[in-house]
Amino acid sequence: MDALLSEPSSEMSAGLMTLRDRLGRVLLGKSEQIEMVLACLLSQGHLLLDDLPGTGKTTLAKALADSLGGRLARIQCTPDLLPTDVTGFNLFNQKTREFEFHPGPVFGDVLLADELNRTTPRTQSALLEAMAERQVTIDAVPHTLSETFFVIATQNPIDSHGAYPLPEAQLDRFTIKLQIGYPDRQAQLGILENATKAKDSNAASGDVVSLTRLRQMQQHVQTITVHPRVREYLVDLVEATRNHSAIQLGVSPRGMLHWQRISQAWAALQGRDFVTPSDVAKVAHPVLSVRLLTATDDVDSVIDQVMSQVAAPEYK
Amino acid sequence: MSTSPRRRIEAILLATIGILSVVPLRIFVESSPWLFAELAAIAILAALRLYAGTREQAAGTATRESGTARKPTGTATKPTGTIRKPAGAPVQADASVPAESAATRDLRISFACNGLSALLMLSPILVAIAARAFGAAVPFEMTALSAFGAAALSIAISAKTDRTRSMSLVASGFLVLFATAISDSPRAAIIAIVWMTGCVWHLVANHWERLEVCLADSVRPTVVVRPLTILAAVVLCVLGGWAAHDRFGDSQRFTGGFMPTSGGSKWSDPAARSGVGSGDAAIAAKDHAESFGAVESDLFLETTQSTLFDMFTDSIGEPKRRKVKREFRQGLAPEKLIETHEKTVKSEQGSSSFTTDRMPPKKHRHFKDATQDAVVQWDGPTGIRLAMHRYDTFDGVQWSNQGNHAVANLTEQSIRERPWFFDPDMHDRINKNSDSVQVNLLKVLRLDSTRIPTPMMTAGLHIKDIIQRQFFGIDPDGTFFMPGREKIPPLTVVNIASMSVMEDELLEQVPAYEQLRQRIQKIRTEFVFDRGITTEGDVPLDEFIRTRRGGDHLFATYAAMQARELGLRSRLVTGFYVRPDAFEYSAGHANVTADDVHVWVEIQMDDGRWFEIEPTPGYLEPVYQPSLFLRAKRMVAAYWLHAVVVACVLAMLYATRLIWVEWLLTLGWSLTWPLSPKRQLSIAMRIIECRAGMLGKPRPIGKPQRDWVEALSASDATLRTRVAQYCDAADRVVFGGGRDVDRESISRFVRGLSSTKLRRSLGLQ
């Protein structure tokens, strides 16, 4: 821990560089999104990938889960998925005459919930406690989840037929929402080229960051300094979202905490041990787009409005 | 630094009471805006000093702590509890400044503290100087008292030991007791009681424990009077005595007033509070014009009242006895007497003529302590003339009145339930143009005349409770008077409504106004005013023109003749001049004495009104305000070339603003080296923002500065590195608690993002 504090950048970068490379190879030309995903991971937050089909959401999620040592659990969300399919259940063992607990996928270290908006709100809600408190309560017995429990959910915004939009309570538990978007021309050429190569199974697998290491890094992120003026800036921004006329639901205090945490993580990824107003502004879009409930569909322009209203702290 | 916050606050409060105790003495007799300005100045300076004090303490704490192991946040706030302000935030931020610059900053703060303390002590004096410069004088002794209070406050705030603080107590205590002692109001004692209560509490609370443990024999004097202090005091006394040694002979007993500005028999300070020697009755009645009533005093005895004729005899000289020209005569029967001869005799008896052929006035013996005998008192503008007699005909030596402006029945009008009596000619004008009317008060004290001294263009009169119009009339010469009595009853207060006239109207209504002005100026500059001159010949005016010396009656006569030469109708006016320095601020009126008799001229305008001119040097000319339009016209006429040049220069400065603003910014930047790194960083960013603002593309407030400059420098690789270096440093210092900054790298940043570069980056080229 001390080593981490004294030499944050080099220590951090060792594992992170490899992770960055790995994800960069999987998702070509999307270094910004990859950086944001890493920030989300370091901030102990959960990630919602929201984009058109075939843009690489699941690939990215899988690559990330693979790269972290630990158990990867995956749920393919369908309308008939039940809460117990997610959390686990107690089964009566005839031999021992006792109830035995069968842990569900949430007890993995990384949970990939694919097409989360295709399952029923009932099942979606099963994730609430797990995401917020890293524990699930089954038959009144709380079970603690992994310390690095990390949810990557994907959803498809276009295909609304047979989809259940995520409730606000659920959305607020995600730290960020990312749109990956179509790759540029160069990246698409690269994708085509990669597809013709023989698959090197070793190259893209194997954990590069151990869970212990990840935990250390997450703890380090918590210690990143946030100057009082930067904190005030955050509060100003949050209050601006609550007072904006086009926003029906502003940022909750939990959302604010997520925002600060991911700003810290972003600062750490830049090799700094303090947060700057730029960090806060940089992560604003992904953080706000997941939790603002706006009157119009164009959330991004509303966020731009909010950001331009609030004066950023100056050098003084 | 054995400062206890409670003791300090108590001392400050007691000093504040001291300052407040002076306020009741001053508030009723002084111009209150200046008094409040002074109090505000004291309050602001005191607040600034308090704030500087917190900074000083905080800095001291921070410096001490930076020497030892610096603890995390929170400790720095501990000892600064003296002031109510939360000092936490700035202290935390300050703790991160390097030790060298902390030392210089400490020096700066303590310099500022001392400067503020001194300024606070001197603030009443400075305000008094400013007030006097602006025409509202503050009495010296009051300034001295206030300065005393300010000193007490200043000491109370800046005292670092209890001994210094007790000096503040002594000062404020003295001030409160003194103010209470000289106050007339019995309620002033309340302030003293409040102060004493506070002081007793303060002493008891701070010294009770010590009193208990003190045994009489264990008390030792803690103050050793240092020889050096005594020596300094003695030297100071000797120096002070030496500085004033040549004035010892001048010293004399107080003639009446306790303080010089209490008033005086001869010398009058603008801030004088009442006239010494005016008599108790006048002073008792000084506060309100209407308050004159029967006073138990023999001040206004009949015998002291003099007619205007007597006054002229005293001041300008008595008319020469004309040699009786003996002609052959023969007794005639009474029925053959010509009627006009009778009339002439009659008019001479009524003294309705004014001769310019006069003897020099007799020398009067004036006693130093003679009381100032005001003939009338005037509550209104000073530097004006009050007319009593007007003469329109001049025979070469004598002025007399032939015109008939007499009005027996004045127009009556009730204004706010008060009966006013107006000159019918002026009445319409007044109603048409009520903005130019002003009402002033005249108190007639000892004037033996039925004529009422009135300023020019007087339209009407009002005397309280007089509702019958036959009390007033207008004399054939155009002067208001009270018919049917011997004189205006003493102590009468007359409300006089007079019109003012704009210079525009004069230009319009007086054909040769400009020439007239030039001639009057000529007379005023080329002739010498001297009432003591003796004329030899029979025609004094000729002599006056030749010697260019004479009394105001000759000035006025000459000016009247000059006006007639220009084809204007003129008339001679005698009456009083209200000296500008005769105004007593506290009493709210000017004393017009017998010495103030004066002669001047009135000129008629085309519409029949008469305006006055002042040919005699030494007397203020009447003020005819030009309208804004006229003033602007004159200004343009006088300064159009300057205006064009200035406009051109401004236009050129505006056109080249980028160049010289850039130059100023560069110069400004080069002067920032002594500042702390944080300030330098901040100023560097301000410079860039200023440049962008000049180009019309300021930074959007929601955009963090780093993002903004990075976007600006995106196209240039070298610049990008410089900007990144600067931003890294700035982020580290401002948000990350870093300290070290390379000034060169900031300079590179400031030079790099020059106006030209910015223009290109912002896409303006």
Image (tube, coloured by chain):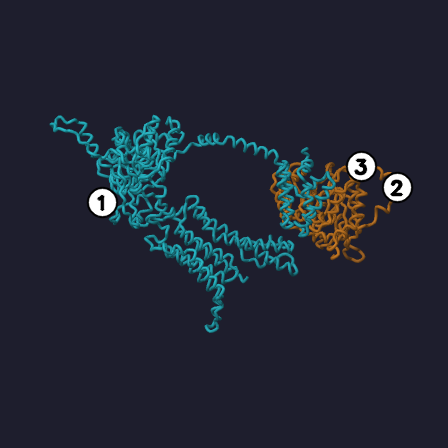
Chain colours: A orange, B cyan
Dot label at residue A145: none
Q: Quadrant of the C terminus of chain B?
A: top right
Mark 2 and mark 3: Cα distance apart in space: 21 Å
Residue at mark 2: A198
Residue at mark 1: B303
Residue at mark 3: A186
Residue B419 visible somewhere in the drawing: no
Q: Residues within 10 Å of mark 2 (few under 14, many from 20)?
A: few
Whether callout 1 and callout 2 share a subunit is answered no
Q: Nearer the viewer, residue B293 or B133?
A: B133
Q: Position of residue B74 (x, y in %)?
A: 62, 57
Chain for numbered disc 1: B
Q: Residues within 10 Å of mark 1 (few under 14, many from 20)?
A: few
Q: Position of residue B423 (x, y in %)?
A: 30, 31
Mark 1 and mark 2: Cα distance apart in space: 136 Å
Q: Position of residue B708 (x, y in %)?
A: 67, 41
